[in-house]
Amino acid sequence: MKSTAVFRTILVWGGLLTLAIAVLASGIGFLVDGTNGLVSALVGTLMSAVFLGITGASILFANRFYGRDMYVPIFFGVVMGGWIVKFIVFLVLVVVLKEQTTLNTTVLFLSILASVIGGLVIDVVVIARSRIPYVSDAKEPSTHSHSD
């Protein structure tokens, strides 16, 4: 399936972006708030990487069922299940991290924001450059001449 290569590319570029943001954000975080800023940047970047990775990985997993009768329900079940898991984990993390006094919430938020925006840019660029047809199994309409 052609989309599998696209999502693998997105995951690879997303991993490289995560590494770059982790290095840059942790350096800035350390300059702003010492060790607390460094840890906050790494936590934010890791959270984003996990959440963005779950989407790509769930699509890659669901694509393994391509061509089977139940592909569409399996695909949407896996992807929606991944989104539900991400939402629940996000809510738990918000509650847990809110209680952490050692985290710099501004650095945490900005590292998450940079990762999410960067991930969206990667998604757009990779998908825009891919050569996946909009229509699959297209057939020309039959031209039957009817004579009265």
Image (tube, helix red, strand yellow):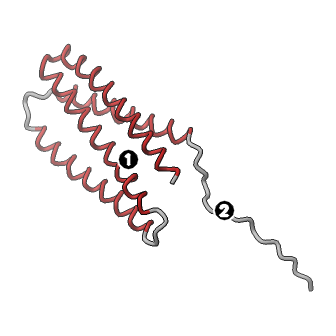
Instruction: For label 2, count other residues whose C-alpha is less than 10 Å away and answer few (under 14), some (14-19) or many (20+).
Output: few
Labels 1 and 2: the sequence-earlier one: 1
Q: Is residue 33 left or right of residue 145?
A: left
Q: Is residue 99 above or below residue 65?
A: above
- Horizontally, residue 138 falls left or right of residue 54, namely right
Classify residue 131 by image quadrant: top right
Residue depicted at x 51% and y 36%: 125
In the image, 78: left or right of 44? Answer: right
Residue that label 1 marks: 56
Q: Residue at x 27, y 26 (%)?
A: 22
Looking at the picture, how far across and down is residue 116, in whole percent? 35, 36
Query: Alpha carbon of mark 1 to alpha carbon of mark 2: how far?
Result: 27 Å
Above or below, comparing residue 80 to residue 124 in the picture = below
Residue 47 vertical placement versus 68 (above, below) = above
Q: Which residue is mark 2?
A: 138
The residue positioned 14% from the left and 16% from the top of the image is: 34
Q: Secondary structure at mark 2?
A: loop
**Image location of residue 84, percent across then percent down:** 27, 56
Image label count: 2
Question: Which residue type does callout 2 highlight?
Answer: Ala
Q: Amino acid at mark 1?
A: Gly
Q: Few, some or many C-alpha atoms within 10 Å of disc 1 (few <14, some 14-19, many ≥20)?
A: many
User: Residue at point 38% right, 47% down?
Assistant: 56
Q: Residue 126: x percent and y percent? A: 50, 38
